[in-house]
Amino acid sequence: MIAVCFFRPRYNPNQAHMSSRYLAFTVFSAGMTTLAVELTASRLLGSVFGTSNIVWASIIGLILIYLTAGYFIGGRWADRSPNFETFYRILLWAAFAAGLTPLVARPVLRAAANAFDLLEIGVLLGSFASVLVLFVVPITLLGTISPFAIRLSLASKEEAGRVSGRIYALSTLGSFVGTFLPVLIFIPQLGTTRTFLLFSFYLMLVALVGLGLSTSWRSTAKWLLLPILLAMLAFIWSRGNLKSSAGQIYETESAYNYIQVLEFGETRFLRLNEGQGVHSVFHPSQLAFDGPWMQFLVAPFFNSAPFAADDIKSIAIIGLAAGTSARQASQVFPGVEILGYELDPEIIEVGREFFGMGMPNLEVIAEDGRVGLAHSDQLFSLIEIDAYRPPYIPWHLTTVEFFEITRQHLEDDGVVAINVGRAPGDRRLIDALVITLLEVFPSVHVMDVPDTFNSMVYATAQPSSFENLEANFALLQETESHPLLLTSIERTLDNQQATPRDGIVLTDELAPIEWIVNSMVLNYVLSGDYEELQ
């Protein structure tokens, strides 16, 4: 039990004992809320600014600075006013500020979301900085709690080490709990803003009870105005969608993503997080869409001619999203069986509700694609990899070891096709993937998807060439092949690229995908040339 000193004269021994026990609970609660706020802040900003390492580094770095300031301020504050009343008042204001932050940030984030759609970089940077600044008050105040609690708990210098260790252990244990609760439970069920408010109201309750135990319940009653005020502001300011994008018909938050469905005419688009990338498209009577989806259909026809659509028996898709490429393949390849891996179960539900992802030949598994494929005993004619979390392709889907897994799950004439990003004049990511694939596959081919920053990389289990693709194209034109297949092959032939011969080999031990992509993004932003993207 932690011994507590600096009691007010009106305390009796029972109150002192209760305050000591409750102080330990308070430290745990403050640690939990601190990490919950940090992780929920990442989701708050991620829905607009994305989830790149640069965004994460900015959030974590500034929060650590705020906590550092809180530790310093808390120690001095505790020495000047070493009593429980001051301690719980600080906690109360910290909790109130935490709940207020997403409400104040909401109009800024909506403006930033619109600026992101238009790539107004100046507005974006200003909005990003403004929102991060909003966290200075709650996080700094929360940082004061641990040193203040140590001061209140310290009865003699002989026990300083034991008391400090206990306080920081309780705080860290609370942080551990606060790491999982928002991501796994509250954000998917309540959303980002309500998760902020939930932890805010919880910590205010902890602070109010602490004030009641430390002073009197009558004097504590006046502080009830803070949660009442926050509840009123939340009712007024938190209504409506998180974003107000044109054409928006649905939005939700999962454990992994902010999910948005837009509709223009009869066409629907799936966007995730900041929205700089369309992950699926649906039209009730059309199949051809600009973008990379239809280019996956081309992959098997790099094999030696004659190769027919009937030869494709099974497809695995890693990064199914809402099923655009699966729907196209179901129409083009008669009788094909498709296994789709999609990490986010909520995206699967959105696909079924809004994107017609109910094909009887499609089996969907909510699992990481590498893990699922490694444990599968199936062989496939085609393995599609389309698992971007803009701007990154997951590094574990880019290595020699992963491509060895894909090779083991291909038919003798099977093909792997990957959707890869690039920047104007910067093809380092493509080069690295091609060189890595050549460690496993005999032939690799590249085409650039026109009017996008996407390229398709094809790796075949058998030696292959663009000449094979031309020969198959000629044969397919003579039959009643699906127009979407013919269009896709023609598009590939018109936009073929030379196979790179220089680049780094990516392995599970060393795959600097984030480094490559970060430098690509920074160089692009600093260039100021955004016309091509628009």
Image (tube, rainbow, N blue to C red):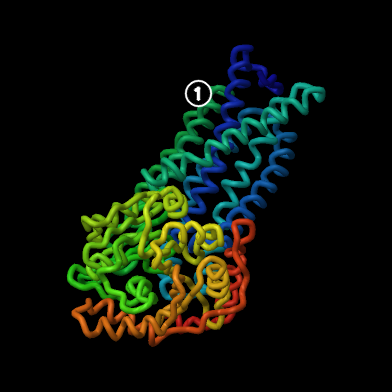
Amino acid type, residue under disc 1 in the picture: Trp
Residue at position x 39%, y 68% in the image? 413
Picture layout, residue 495 above or below residue 323: below
Residue 401 in view in this figure: yes
Q: How far from the left and from the top, in percent, is residue 139? A: 59, 46
Position of the C terminus, as image quadrant, is: bottom left
Q: Which residue is mark 1?
A: 217
Q: Is residue 130 visible?
A: no
- Count of picture labels: 1
Q: Residue furthest top?
A: 13
Crowdedness near tag 1: few (<14), some (14–19) or many (≥20) residues, C-alpha within 10 Å? some
The quadrant in which the N terminus is found is: top right
Q: Residue at x 63, y 12 (%)?
A: 13
Residue 214 x/y as whole percent: 59, 23
The residue shown at (71%, 35%) is 78
Q: Is residue 1 above or below residue 289?
A: above
Question: In the picture provided, is 159 more to the left or to the right than 291?
Answer: right
Residue 129: x, y in percent? Answer: 56, 63
Quadrant of the image occupied by residue 507: bottom right
Q: Secondary structure at mark 1?
A: helix
